[in-house]
Image (cartoon, helix red, strand yellow):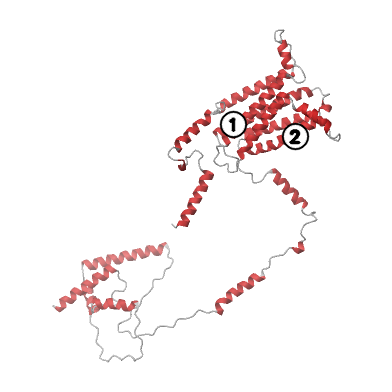
Amino acid sequence: MSYAETRTTDDRRRRRLAVTGDATSPDPSEGPGGIARLRDRLGELPAASPWLPRTLWKRGVLGAAFGLALAVAGFLLVQPLSWAPAIAPVADHLLSGRQPVLFGYLTTVLWLVAAQFAGLVGWYRSHSERDFRGRYRVWAGLVLAFAGASFLAGTGVHQPLAAAVTPHLPESIWRPATVTWSAPLAGIGAWLWWRMDRDLRRGLAGLWLTRLAGATLLATGLGCLFAPELAREAWYPAAMLLGPIIGLGLLVLGLWLQACYVAYVCADPPEPASNGWVRNGLALISSLLRPWWPFGRPAAEVEEPEAKPTRRRKKADDEEPEAAPKRRRKPAAKSRRTTKSRTRVKPEVEEETVEDEEAAEESWEAEEESWDESAETPGETDEAWLEAATAPEPVSTKPAPTPPRNASPPASTADDDDDDDDRADGPHANADLFKGLSKRQRRELKRQLREQQRQRDD
């Protein structure tokens, strides 16, 4: 294997390991302590989040308990109850009023818990071996956004700031007291929510819970914006109290399940979607508007590919070999051979069927058996055949013609070499005698011929 092929194979192996390799495999470049450091890191991952259970039944129990606690809190906020005289002052302080104290504390705590789970998801996502674009950094922005929302929910400072800025705004703004603080928060929240939704597409449970949470919080924001029209409705105060609690509860639950997923299942980013609903919608709209688009290119200007020039090129290519014929080499001068020429038959390679191969094998086996029998019991036919083969050729009395003076020297060929080998074997050499025999049979025949010649000389 050449150097280029080896380098290509190494590059393919690196890409395959980067895409399908195990994230827990140690890197040999870390040194002798790489495996130990990797084990320590894997041991620290579950220890850093003891509140993330590994088993499903524990997650179900904790999720049900969390939902039940939120349901009880929402019921206490919405439904007025008659309390005992001993606890009535405390209950009235926590649950009475347009904005109960318990509601403010509850929303503040839920935003803080959501920020903590977002930071935990981002920390696990930062250990991914395939996040080449660094998409885990979006979770840092989510942590800051959730922490800021918790501060605003606990202090309510956004409303006094909006009231202070409202006199300096033009009168054309619709409901400036609410739009001043709701519009910036809605824009920032929509952008961050879209970024979070892109990174949650591996864990379906967390994805759909966060989507429901976003829809609930959006409906609550619209309720705040249209408060003058909806304040007369009997269900409006209860909806404005339950909406944030339900939305934040779904958000915390979705981030908690996503943290469990990236901690114990897969911390890699989701695969990029080839076709989304936005892309499909734009493609459909463009296909419908294309016939009426006034700036399209006219059909007359579209140049069609011509096939005739290609045909002419092909003809020209075909005529090139005829215009430049190949040069023929001058044949070498023929020399008179003093020995009998041997005819060589080149074996023709043909495609044989299975039956022809079996027949050929049977014929070879039969010939080998006949050779073995003749070697064990030599008969009179073999001796006669050997005598006829070893009979000396009659000597010609005609004088050999003299070659001309300008005759070229004989060309050395492979046939002359074979004739020299035959002459070296003795006067018994004959081309037809050894034709069709293997090397072993030729050696055996030559040995028998030499023995017979020695017996005749004696």
Q: Earlier in the sequence, mark 2 or mark 1?
A: 1
The residue nearer to you, when weighing 415 against 404, is: 404
Q: Going by the image, does 455 lie left or right of 74?
A: left
Nearest the viewer among 235 and 191 is 191
User: Residue at horizontal 59%, vertical 26%?
Assistant: 60
The N terminus, quarter of image: bottom left
> Picture coordinates of residue 196 (x, y %)?
65, 36
Name above or below for residue 126 compared with residue 346: above
User: Residue 58, how many percent across, how many down?
Assistant: 56, 25
Q: Amino acid at mark 1?
A: Leu
For the point 80% across and 28% down, which residue is it? 164
Count neighbours of disc 1 (C-alpha within 10 A) and say few if under 14, some if 14 to 19, many if 20 or more.
many
Q: Is residue 122 visible?
A: yes
Q: Residue furthest top?
A: 85
Q: Which residue is mark 2?
A: 184
Q: Secondary structure at mark 2?
A: helix
Name the residue tied to disc 1: 120
Q: Secondary structure at mark 1?
A: helix
**From the viewer's perspective, is 281 left or right of 390?**
right
Amino acid type at circle 2 is: Pro
Q: Which of the 4 quarters of the picture holds residue 277? A: top right
Q: Pick the residue in front: 188 or 440.
A: 188
**Percent position (x, y) of residue 79?**
74, 17
Give the number of the mark in front: 2 or 1.
Answer: 2
Instruction: Give the percent coordinates (x, y) of residue 314.
Output: 61, 72
Separation of residues labelled 2 and 1 (CA atoms): 27 Å
Q: Residue at 82% of width from left, 24% of height from top? A: 233
* Neighbour tally class for label 2: few under 14, some 14-19, many 20 plus, Cα within 10 Å: few
Residue 34 quadrant:
top left
Q: Is residue 336 above or below residue 309?
A: below
Near-viewer residue (163 or 456): 163
Image quadrant occupied by the C terminus: bottom left
